[in-house]
Amino acid sequence: MAPPIKVMVIDDSAVVREVMAQLLSADRAIEVIGAAPDPVFALARMARQWPDVIVLDVEMPRMDGLTFLRKIMAERPTPVVICSTLTTQGAETTMQAMAAGAVSIVAKPKVNLKATLLEGADDLVSMVKAAAQARVRRPVARVAGAVPAKLTADAVLPAAAASRALSETTDRVVAIGTSTGGTQALEVVLGGLPADSPGIVVVQHMPAQFTAAFAQRLNTVCEIEVREAAHGDRVHPGLALIAPGGRHLVLERSGAQYRVGVVDGPPVSRHRPSVDVLFRSVARAAGRNAMGVIMTGMGDDGARGLKEMRDLGARTLGQDEDSCVVYGMPKEAMKLGAVEREVALERIAGVIAGR
């Protein structure tokens, strides 16, 4: 049996520390080795036993989480799950933390704190387990309960129909799906694209309150325009649309053009937005006019949708294992025969741009 995942919880809220420690300890694969009110206390405890995963608040006394995260990543890179308050200011700070190397986000509300954390217990445990598998590196410049039923894209869209997807248009669409490690990977890819790149639609697994801030941050470091998708937005060259957290993103044909729909629906592959839903919609609407890219992430969301895209003539790329934080989603896509070509992270932008 594998040794348990050693976790350190760092949060100035006693309620958060207590509830998170209880929820994580309830899973036999996890051992909470400590819970500290700020990074200074945590560092003293970690000097005796280093954790496999750190669950970290952002706004804390004595040393803020962002400063601590940068210190850890520079000195001893360790998977970090950010626990952030659901406010606009908190979302912006959290995006800085993700850029500094954190692998995922636990959303922490200001009200009904305990109840919300209890409701999200399965997500918290899954995030910690995914983080434990992550291969974190020093940052480079710019870079226990019942398991719910796992639905497929059928829950949101019918299967792709070949007859709707084969006619060619002058517009091209690139669909990108990613999860754990994806915030940093997307910055590398989108930041490497020229302003005249094909229109891009993106699903990044992320809580609802953070996707707008994530898109805004990417927009400041990219030549292309990046923004959170709104229902009816046209997909056009030089624009990347990020799926809003908590809702599915689908591509729709509008004559010879493409637009996006932002739709409700159940979680698919346990995610909303789901990469499988996006990829299936792209297969239906764009077919051979599209390219699909599946990148770092835990699980198999997107693998089946990418296979549908490839079957209908789209080009398909998978991020290679060496450059993934978690080689889960691309690996599952490879197993299905969905990936036409594996590419290192730093080369994906060049392939999209036709270089």
Image: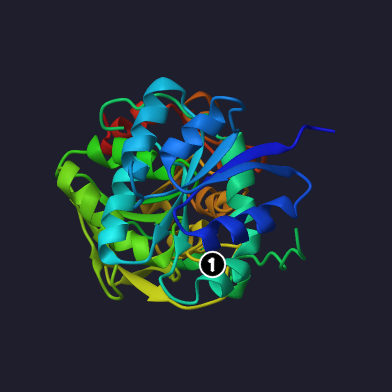
Whether residue 329 appears in this view of the structure is yes
Indicate the position of residue 21 as horizontal and vertical percent values: 64, 53
On the rendered structure, is 81 left or right of 65?
right
Indicate the position of residue 108 as horizontal and vertical percent values: 45, 64
Amino acid at dot 1: Ala
Indicate the position of residue 227 as horizontal and vertical percent values: 23, 59
Above-or-below relation of 324 to 329: above
Q: 181 or 2: nearer the eye?
A: 2
Q: Which residue in the structure is indicated by mark 1?
A: 161
**In the image, farthest residue toward the right:** 1
What residue sits 55% from the left and 52% below the top?
Answer: 302
Q: 104 or 294: nearer the eye?
A: 104
Above-or-below relation of 336 to 21: above
For residue 190, what is the image quadrant? top left
What residue sits 25% from the left and 70% below the top?
Answer: 233
Which element carries disc 1, helix, strand or loop?
Answer: loop
Above-or-below relation of 222 to 252: above
